[in-house]
Structures are given as structure tokens and as C-alpha cells.
Amino acid sequence: MNRLLLSFFASLLTVTLNAQIYVGGNLGMSFSRDVATATTYIQSRNRVSVAPEIGYSFNKLFSLGASVGYNWTESAGSHHITIAPYARITFVQWAHFGLFVDALYEYNFNLQTSDVGLNTWKAGLSPGIKIPISEKCGFTTRIAFIGWQRYLKEIVFLPSLNIINSASVGFYWTL
């Protein structure tokens, strides 16, 4: 029995040493303000988000990962928990940067109410740039989102291309 356990832990250690597990995440803040006229309507939409991330690189081109995050939006005073699994394909890899596309599904749980209709989701593709700092760490940024979104109780599925307001910057560390 002891030899079996020792063999199991030795093989687990070997797999772990060769694994390409990475950890990281995003910390985001956005500030925007809608103004209809100078005196009648002003609404700020300040947002703060924190999303730790973990993933596994099968090779230099393909990896799977997920992030679990928290979002707070000032305009509605809303609090959300976000779960976002993704599959990443790196299609260009140079020494100083790489280009990738994430196929992702994101689900946002609204913590303010028990009404499931207020939960939102999106599914689609998100292109981005990966900038390595060293062999084990670097930065990633998603620069757009192309896909379908469901917001509030409306069941409207619209392809969207958000280049300006969907950029996010993250940090990763390969174990």
C-alpha cells in the first residue's frame, strides 16, 4: 500500500512539473457619464471589477481557462458574480507578443435580487494580445467582443462588436 501511494504521488509530481498551469486575473475600472443636456440628465456608470483566473496550456497554441469575478456598477448599485470559462487559440506567436482569440461564455449572477431574469450572459469570440515579460509571466488584453448577449429580461440576441468599451488588461504567471 505504501509503495502504491508513493508511486501515485511521484507520478502526480511528474505531471505537475511538466504542466503548463497559469494563474492570473483582471482588475478593471471604467468611468463613463451620459449627459442629455447640461441641466437635465446626468448618469454616471462607474464600474469596478476583480476577476482571478486559472488555466491550463496544452501547448503553445491552445489553452483552456476560467475566471470567477466580482463586478460593482454605480448607476444601478448592482453587484454581480461572473463565471467565464474560455478556450484560447494563439494563432500568431512572436518573441515580443502574440495574438489570440478566446471563445468564451460569461454568465453574470445578479446578487441584488433572486429574480433569475435579471441575470445576464454573453457568448462569442474575444480577440486579444499577449505580451510576455519573461518566460513565466506577462500581460494579456482582450480588445473586442464579437458575439451574442442577453441583458435583463429582454431575450434579444444581437451580434455586437465592442472595441472601445470592452478592453480588459490582465496579468498571468505560469507555474
Image: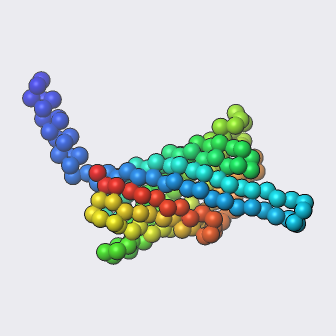
Foreground residue among 165 and 162? 165
Numbered circles on residues, count: 0
Residue 137 shown left or right of residue 81 in the figure: left
Figure quadrant of residue 81 = top right
Q: Residue at x 34, y 55 (%)?
A: 173
- Could you tell me residue 35's position as x and y percent? 82, 64
Farthest residue in the top direction?
1
- Could you tell me residue 123's position as x and y percent? 58, 56
Figure quadrant of residue 164 = bottom right
Q: Compared with residue 101, is residue 123 higher up or lower down, i.e. above or below?
A: above
Q: Is residue 126 visible?
A: no
Q: Compared with residue 93, is residue 39 higher up or lower down, i.e. above or below?
A: above
Residue 96 shown left or right of residue 144 in the figure: left
Q: How is the image coloured?
A: rainbow
- Could you tell me residue 84's position as x and y percent? 52, 50
Q: Is residue 139 visible?
A: yes
Q: Residue at x 66, y 59 (%)?
A: 31
Residue 169 shown left or right of residue 72 in the figure: left
Farthest residue in the right direction?
40
Q: Residue at x 48, y 68 (%)?
A: 128
Foreground residue among 103 and 67? 67
- Could you tell me residue 8's position as x and y percent? 17, 35
Foreground residue among 65 and 49? 49
Q: Residue at x 46, y 59 (%)?
A: 170
Farthest residue in the front direction?
39
Image quadrant for the N terminus? top left
